[in-house]
Image (cartoon, rainbow, N blue to C red):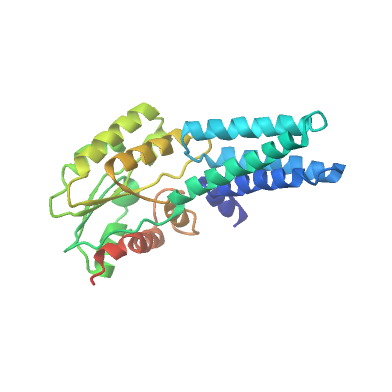
Amino acid sequence: MPSAWLIHHVASGQAFFTGAACLIAAAWLSTRAKRTPLRATRNALVGSGTILVVASATPLPVWTYVILFVWTASWAVGEWHVGKLSARTVGALRLGVAAVWLAAVMLEATYHVIPALPRLDRPMLGVVGDSLTAGTGDAHVVGWPTILGREHGIDVRTHARAGAGVAEAIGLAREITPAENLVLLEIGGNDMLGGTPVARFEEGLDRLLAEVVRPGRVVVMMELPLPPTFNAFGRSQRRLARRYGVHLIPKRVLLGVLLRQGTTSDSVHLTEAGANAMADAVWRMLGPAFTSD
């Protein structure tokens, strides 16, 4: 479905790369935009690229966006006064705007790579989550952690509650035993969509990670798919993941399940097909930790 593809492209953050490519192409096209049609194409690329970058809600650091804005604005002003500036100045602005956007692409690309997990000795998986993990109480839908354990013969412990946010997840995390040496966090969607202030979300997530992260334990967290303007939630996740050494699963993984036809009953809660798809997706991410030499 085209609409599902567009939602995935935007909410997964992939639209950031498309938008950056438009802006880099516009800078290149400026070297040849002496005729009106080419200038119109360049301007359309700038507008489209800007919209895609903003819509993607890519949680780059604020200072990165400041640099991108300053360079892009300077370049745009330079193109407007191209006849009044030296060729060297105009060339430097074009090269500079292409360079900063390329650097931003390289920086963001690291968050779209599946993390390489170490192999663990006798791994036991603990999952902390909300209704996506706990389910909604429908007896016909087996939770994906149960399916994961059954299909692959692994020990999975579930610590999840429908409606949970990071504050409630702290209490759930206290149920984790020392034997659970691999922990997956699927949490934060209720905070983001329920209006929790970003500062409170970050404080709660900080406390949650402090509770979960232990020497010898591998902790993995699903990155939140972000609607436009919700960048700050993603920045909090990334900042704390770096601080605690937590592996982030790219948000396209979760979106790939939620946007597949028939996997949800209301775009959020999993159906039987969705629970199976989620179990498969999680296994692709965590399976290497269970693979023996």
Which sits in the foreground, 148 or 40? Answer: 40
Task: Judge from the rendering whether residue 110 lies leftward or rightward of residue 203; answer left or right.
Answer: right
Q: Position of residue 25 (x, y in %)?
A: 69, 48
Residue occupying image coordinates x 65% and y 46%: 24
Q: Work out whether 134 lies above or below 148.
A: above
Query: Could you say which is closer to the camera, residue 82 or residue 113?
Result: 82
Q: Is residue 242 left or right of residue 84?
A: left
Tell which of 249 and 27 is nearer to you.
Answer: 27
Q: How many marks?
A: 0
Q: Position of residue 250 (x, y in %)?
A: 42, 51
Residue at the right extreme, as displayed: 35
Left or right of residue 250, residue 152 in this image:
left
Q: Could you tell me which residue is drawn at 51 percent across and 46 percent down?
A: 11
Q: Pinpoint residue 43: horizontal percent, then vertical percent.
A: 75, 39
**Residue 57 seen in the current view:** yes
Q: Quadrant of residue 173?
A: top left
Please say if 201 is above or below 268.
Answer: above
Measuring 86% from the left and 42% from the top, which residue is drawn there? 36
Residue 163 visible in the snapshot: no
Res 2 quadrant in image: bottom right
Percent coordinates x, y for residue 182 in the rendering: 23, 55
> Against 10, is 153 above or below?
below
The quadrant of the rendering that contains the C terminus is bottom left
Q: Quadrant of the N terminus?
A: bottom right
Q: Observer-nearest residue: 44 or 6?
A: 44
Query: From this viewpoint, which residue is outermost toward the bottom?
Result: 293
